[in-house]
Structures are given as C-alpha cells and as structure tokens.
Image (tube, rainbow, N blue to C red):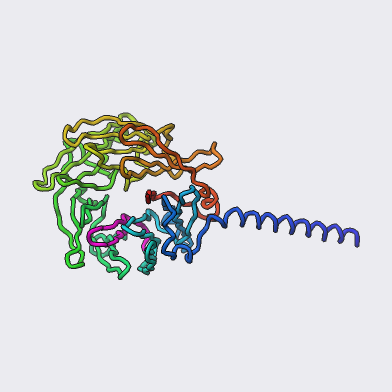
C-alpha cells in the first residue's frame, strides 16, 4: 500500500507541475497582448498606434450579462494589444481630431489626449459612431428597439466636457456625416418606405429635419443598405441593394445620389447579381457596411464582399470595376475581413489559416489598384483565443495614421 500511495503522490505531483507549466505558458502567451484600463488612460497611449479594430459578441450572447467586446490597437511594429469591455453587438469606434471614442453596452470611453468615462443605460446594439470636427462633438447612435409609441434610436453626443442624451424616433437603415450634421436613412417597416433625414445640434440640442423619401425604381420594392452615407459639396451618396418582391435569386447594388439644392434623385446601377443562391448573395455583402464607399479624385469607390472595387465617375457617371483584392474569399463566411479608405488607399483586414501570423491588413492604391503594403498583426489570434465561452465578431476597423 505504501508503494501504491508513493506512485499516486508522484503522479499527482507530476500532474501539478505540468498543469502549472501549461498555465504559466498560456498566461505568458496571452498577457502581453492584453492591456488594462490604466494603460488606455495615458495621454500618449495612441501615439504609437497605427490601426484599431472592434470585436464583440452578439446581443443574444449577453442574456447572462457575460457578453464581451474587445478593442484591438495595432502599434507601429504590427503588434496588437486588446482592451476587453462588456459586449455590444455592432459596436464601433469614432476617430476624433485628437482621440477615439470606444463603447460597450453601458460605457463610453474617450481616450487620447484626455481620458473620460461616461456611464449610460444599457444598449444591446450599436448603429453608428462619429465625430463632428467643427463642433468638436463625438456621437454614438444605438439601435434601441421598439417602444410604446414607435421606435427608438438613442443618441449620446459630447466631448471631454460632458455628454448629452437624445433620441431619434425612427429605425435607422444607415447613416453618415455631412460637415456638422448626421445623415440618417430611416425605414418605416410597416409602409416599407425610406426617408433621408438630417440630425443637427442647434445650441447643442438635437434636432431632426426630414429631407426626402427615397424613390424605388419601377418593379423594385425592397431596399437594404450596402454602405454608409457620404457627401460632397453638391450631393448625398449611398449604396443600396434593391430587389423585386419574391425574387430571392437576383439583386442590384445601386448608387443613390441626391442633389443637395433640389433633392433630385438619381439611381445608378453599380453591379447586378443574377441567378444566385442565398449564400452567393450573402457573400456580396460588403466587408464593412460603414466603410464601403469613398470619394477620391473625381470618382466614387465602392467595395463589395467579393473583394471587387467599383468606381463611378462623378461627372461622367461611367461605372467600371477598378480592381479586385488579391485572392478574395468568395464564400459567405467571414474571418474578420474589414475595409477602410484613407487618403489615396484602401486598407483590407485579411485572414489566412496558412500563414504563421494569420491576421494582417493590406493596403491598395486607389489610383492603380495595386497592393502597396502588408502589415502582419501579431497578437490578434492570441487575443481572440483568450475569449472563453463566447464568440466574437468583427464590427469595425480604422486606420489612425
């Protein structure tokens, strides 16, 4: 018996040593890529960061109040560090003049030259965040859901001096920024109509102005959004997907252009998808619905979910396929792919199971369509693998420099 006990004790000791070594190794592997709040509170935290990504669990995973979101900061050496928060489906990031607004379901955080934390009532789904430069106002809009007298899209807006609350009594299909105002495309679900509206801040008070109802082309009765709303001096622009009722195989991506002075509408077909399966049509959904269109030079660019980039001449109205990213994923399943336009480039988050560093982002020239740079994002895989019991999805990606 003594001999048996001796072997049992020896076995347990070996097991504890092995388990301890594994735990330490795992901690060493993960901990360098996780940052705590004291780090993001520092005024110089963003100085060496070149990109930021937002991941979160979905609203249905937060029923136990254990949902999680992660903001990942990629430094100039390509090393990612993750800050963990509570969950917020479709959460996003607002890039201001000197800092960032990051959010979860009950807290806003301003980081950069000044740190500020704002508590709010629980929100389950994000809609849009942004920054109005001339007003020095950050804002975030939430898809708050149905209420007694209709629909609510709660808004918080402010800066390091404080935030105010407001509400947009509409379901928002998509949104964007035009100088000192927020543009929203709202949808009346019962009437199946869409309206373009402006949200302003007169005397720091939220106001809403109805601009125009979006017209459907003959035979098409269903719109869903494929982009954010952008503008130039003369027009508002957005890309919508149009379908005919009952037709599940065909769809068009169309550019809706609205003249600011007259509110005259034009619809330009960018690309048509014919005789597709549901999965094939799902695969065309842009990687980033909030960053899929952009104006550069005399062209408007649109990036779809197949890796194709189309352009429309702003004066000629000529549509062409400008370029396709290298080896695009063609299926409906995504692995964190996102797009972002900045200056003369488009940036694309990519994933490859065959690479040692599986997550990276590529840079493409808008003039030539050629790939000009690749940044390996060390640590993203380790940060994502540190999430236990929940699955997180990619909702935002922005270039900081």
State the residue at coordinates (32%, 68%): 160
Is residue 400 at all visible to an observer of this figure? Answer: yes
Q: Position of residue 12 (x, y in %)?
A: 78, 59
Is residue 1 at all visible to an observer of this figure? Answer: no
Residue placed most toward the observer, 262 or 298: 298
- Judged from this view, the residue extending furthest toward the right is 2
Q: Position of residue 131 (x, y in %)?
A: 28, 57
Residue 56 included in the magenta stretch of the image: no
State the residue at coordinates (27%, 67%): 165
Answer above or below: position of 257 versus 158. Answer: above
Could you tell me what secondary structure mostly forms the magenta stretch?
strand
Quadrant in which the N terminus is drawn: bottom right
Q: Position of residue 108 (x, y in %)?
A: 37, 64
Residue 133 included in the magenta stretch of the image: yes
Residue 105 located left or right of residue 150? right
State the residue at coordinates (20%, 49%): 194
Give the quadrant of residue 23. Answer: bottom right
State the residue at coordinates (28%, 42%): 293
Q: Position of residue 123 (x, y in %)?
A: 36, 62
Give the quadrant of residue 303. Answer: top left
- Judged from this view, the residue extending furthest toward the left is 262
Answer above or below: position of 105 versus 383. Answer: below
Span of residues in magenta: 123-143
């Amino acid at each position: 018996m003594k001999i048996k006990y001796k072997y049992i004790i020896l076995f347990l000791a070996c097991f504890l040593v092995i388990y301890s070594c594994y735990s330490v190794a795992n901690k060493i592997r993960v901990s360098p890529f996780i940052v705590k709040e004291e780090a993001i509170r520092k005024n110089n935290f963003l100085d060496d960061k070149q990109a930021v990504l937002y991941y979160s669990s979905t609203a249905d995973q937060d029923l136990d109040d254990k949902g999680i979101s992660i903001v990942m900061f990629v430094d100039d050496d390509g090393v990612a560090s993750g800050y963990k928060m509570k969950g917020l489906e479709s959460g996003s990031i607002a890039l201001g003049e000197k800092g960032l607004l990051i959010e979860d379901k009950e807290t806003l955080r301003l980081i950069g030259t000044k740190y500020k934390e704002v508590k709010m009532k629980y929100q389950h789904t994000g809609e849009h965040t942004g920054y109005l430069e001339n007003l020095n106002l950050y804002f975030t809009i939430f898809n708050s859901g149905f209420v007694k007298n209709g629909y609510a899209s709660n808004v918080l807006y402010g800066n390091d001096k404080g935030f105010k609350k407001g509400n947009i009594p509409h379901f928002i299909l998509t949104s964007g920024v035009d100088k000192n105002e927020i543009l929203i495309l709202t949808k009346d679900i019962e009437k199946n109509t869409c309206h373009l509206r402006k949200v302003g801040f007169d005397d720091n008070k939220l106001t809403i102005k109805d601009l125009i109802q979006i017209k459907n082309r003959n035979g098409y009765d269903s719109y869903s959004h494929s982009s954010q709303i952008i503008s130039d001096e003369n027009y508002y622009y957005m890309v919508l997907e149009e379908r005919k009722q009952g037709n599940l195989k065909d769809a068009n991506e169309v550019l809706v252009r609205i003249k600011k002075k007259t509110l005259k509408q034009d619809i330009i077909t960018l690309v048509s998808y014919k005789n597709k399966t549901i999965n094939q049509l799902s695969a065309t959904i842009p990687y980033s619905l909030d960053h899929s269109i952009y104006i550069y030079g005399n062209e408007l660019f649109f990036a779809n979910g197949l890796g194709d980039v189309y352009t429309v001449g702003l004066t000629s109205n000529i549509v062409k396929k400008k370029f396709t990213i290298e080896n695009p994923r063609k299926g409906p399943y995504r692995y964190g792919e996102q797009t972002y336009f900045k200056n003369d480039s488009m940036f694309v988050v990519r994933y490859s199971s065959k690479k040692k560093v599986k997550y990276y982002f590529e840079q493409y020239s808008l003039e030539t369509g050629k790939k000009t740079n690749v940044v390996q994002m060390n640590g993203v895989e380790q940060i994502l693998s540190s999430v236990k019991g929940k699955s997180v999805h990619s909702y935002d990606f922005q270039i900081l420099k």
